[in-house]
């Protein structure tokens, strides 16, 4: 592999600043995340049974993504898709939490400390989160979607069409702790 410099330390490499501008905002009934970010990592705000109920509610709940009006034409052609990939910013994660490199997934002490990039934790160096949602309808600059797990007011960074064929279908593996968490919150992993 060809390297652009002698060092393999990215912190030594000069990058131009990255500037993200929200393309919209999420509007829904979720005012508080069920995982709370803090200096020590994350912790569950509620018991697993309550989280399971919240996950079920989120999977059926309608939300709106209000797109910035200045981006006229950006939604053209999107109605042809049934599902979308939404990238959004976890705006309520405290700045000090962004230096955390390992967490107990979902704040569960019964799961060993795990590197952030091995989890779906909102606590990350850059608080970019992603989810796949079902597109219900588009009305002007408002997308009505089902299944977004973001809290109200989350800035949307980008939207991409979801095509199942772009993602691996076979040979996908996940660690046992992740499989257990998915089962506990009622997510079907039978295709994995």
Image (cartoon, rainbow, N blue to C red):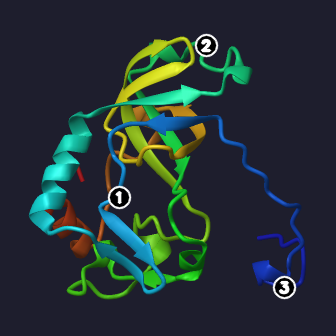
Q: Is residue 30 left or right of residue 8?
A: left
Q: Which residue corresponds to mark 1?
A: 33
Q: Is residue 190 in sight in this rendering?
A: no
Q: Residues within 10 Å of mark 2 (few under 14, many from 20)?
A: few
Looking at the image, tell me whether mark 1 or mark 3 is earlier in sequence order. 3
| Residue 52 x/y as whole percent | 15, 56
Residue 53 location in percent, x, y? Answer: 13, 51
Front one among 164 and 23: 23
* Residue at 40%, 40% in the rendered image: 132
Query: SS for tag 2?
Result: loop
Report which residue position mark 2 lands on: 76
User: Sequence order check: which comes first, mark 1 or mark 2?
Assistant: 1
From the top left corner, tell me how far across and down residue 6 is, in percent.
Answer: 89, 84
Earlier along the polypeptide chain: callout 2 or callout 3? 3
Give me the residue at 55% from left, 11% from top: 140
| Distance Cα–Cα, label 1 vs label 3 | 39 Å
Q: Residues within 10 Å of mark 1 (few under 14, many from 20)?
A: some
Q: Residue at x 20, y 86 (%)?
A: 110
Q: Could you tell me which secondary element the residue under label 1 belongs to?
A: loop
Q: Tell me how far mark 2 sits from mark 3, CA to CA.
A: 44 Å
Q: Mark 3 — residue? A: 7
Q: Nearer the viewer, residue 189 or 135?
A: 135
Question: Do residues under tags 1 and 3 come within 8 Å of each other at their CB atoms?
Answer: no
């Amino acid at each position: 592999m060809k390297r652009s410099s002698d060092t393999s330390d990215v912190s030594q490499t000069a990058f131009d600043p990255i500037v993200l501008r929200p393309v919209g905002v999420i509007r829904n009934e979720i005012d508080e995340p069920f995982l709370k970010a803090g200096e020590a990592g994350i912790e569950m705000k509620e018991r697993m049974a309550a989280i399971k109920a919240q996950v079920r509610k989120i999977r059926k709940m309608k939300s709106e993504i209000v797109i910035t009006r200045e981006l006229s034409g950006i939604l053209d052609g999107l109605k042809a898709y049934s599902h979308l990939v939404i990238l959004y910013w976890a705006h309520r994660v405290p700045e000090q939490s962004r230096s955390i490199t390992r967490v107990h997934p979902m704040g569960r002490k019964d799961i060993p400390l795990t590197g952030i990039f091995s989890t779906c934790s909102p606590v990350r160096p850059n608080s970019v989160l992603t989810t796949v949602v079902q597109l219900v309808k588009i009305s002007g600059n408002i997308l009505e979607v089902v299944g977004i797990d973001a809290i109200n007011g989350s800035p949307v960074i980008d939207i991409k069409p979801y095509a199942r064929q772009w993602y691996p279908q076979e040979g996908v593996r996940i660690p046992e702790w992740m499989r257990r968490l998915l089962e506990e919150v009622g997510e079907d992993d039978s295709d994995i």
